[in-house]
Amino acid sequence: MGTESASLLPFTAHRVQLPDGSWTMEGGDDPLTALSTATVIREAGGSLAGLRILDVGCLEGGYTVAFARHGATEVIGLEVRATNLARCALLADELRLPAVRFVQGDAKELSPETHGSFDVVFASGLLYHLDDPYGFLARVQPMTQRFLLLDTHIAHPTAFAHGCSPRLASLERDGRTYVGRVAFEYDSALERPALDQLVWASYGNPTSFWLTEDSLVAMLHDLGFASVSKTFVPRGSAVGKPARGSVARSTSPASEADIRAQGATDGGGATPSRGWSASVTPSTTGSAASERSLRGSIAPVIVRYLSATFVIRSPAPDAAARAPGPTDESRT
Ligand SMILES: C[S@@+](CC[C@H](N)C(=O)[O-])C[C@H]1O[C@@H](n2cnc3c(N)ncnc32)[C@H](O)[C@@H]1O
């Protein structure tokens, strides 16, 4: 490995073994054995052979590579950040898996015409980084032949955490109202080079919208997906992460400054989800009103999950005609 490639190590999240036996990082997630990878294989009927998979927001490409190593016929890793794509390119160079291709692109601009259609769309740790989840899911729906896997944070109806607004907000789309919380991602004054270095965060939207579970399921239904099922991550499992920060219960309004303050505390909304759960404790960052309403009222409540993996099936598996493949311009 050259000096330039070596400077891309260690990775920030994906632990992948390279041909010389070394690993891209210590700790981290092992996408080869991760629960979401196993879920995709299970939902595909036990084998990825013959399947075309899109990994949207692929970060360092660990999952893209894992699907290929598990036998997928073609896997495209789509990622918006050049910094992350450089690490994807390192994996591609080292592993030389013919099924894998990495593409630079924005999830907000996905289209069947440009990117093609896929048996499986894998969107892990992405949905809650978008300010228009409806627009994203509406674009993905016609691209999904069999199922979409979403591993995502969801907004708790009565508690907030992780840079989310204490107050529930609504999102109006196509005459329908969806409910969730606005989450702080990064300072809108940030220049592109600095934004590129926030490797886990959103891109082009300084705030994102976290749907409640009910609204997410309703939205998927409204967009024409056939069914939604949820995978619970057992607490203490290898893929679970310890709770971070506190979770506060409140229906009181809070200012954008409150959201930003809590986002900064939690690291700018940049943490991948993967099934952590948290005990509820009073917030130290919410508004004074919400602090007052909390005291003494919420001691030992356990929020079983603030994130989950959803498998969403397309209405007519294998029936829709395949759209053309990606254009050369969109490839890296
Ligand atoms: C929390 S990370 C999750 C990474 C990976 N999918 C995983 O589960 O480990 C979010 C990823 O989405 C990417 N991302 C954020 N907004 C995006 C967008 N609009 N288009 C494409 N990728 C985006 C980020 O650059 C980052 O790689």
Image (cartoon, rainbow, N blue to C red):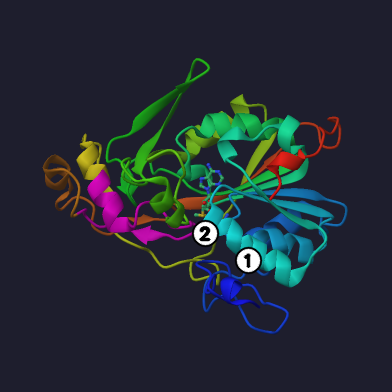
Quick check: is 107 in the magenta stretch? no
Contact (CB < 8 A) between labels 1 and 2?
A: yes
Q: Residues within 10 Å of mark 2 (few under 14, many from 20)?
A: many
**Is 278 left or right of 75, judged from the image as shown?**
left
Residue at 50% in and 15% down: 175
The residue to which callout 2 is attached is: 274
* Part of the protein shown in magenta: 260-283
Residue 34 disc label: 1
Residue at 19% in and 50% down: 297
**Is 71 left or right of 189, judged from the image as shown?**
right
Q: Residue type at mark 1?
A: Ala
Percent across and percent down for residue 53 are 75, 49
Q: Is residue 218 visible?
A: no
Secondary element under disc 2, as helix, strand or loop, is loop
Q: In terms of image quadrants, where is residue 112?
A: top right
Q: Residue type at mark 2?
A: Arg
Residue sitting nearer the eye, 7 or 161: 7
Question: Label 1 vs label 2: CA separation?
Answer: 10 Å
Image vertical order of residue 10 relative to residue 118, above or below? below
Q: Ligand 1 closer than 8 Å to the CB at disc 2?
A: yes
Image vertical order of residue 133 relative to residue 310, above or below? above
Q: Is residue 50 visible?
A: yes
Percent across and percent down for residue 93 are 72, 67
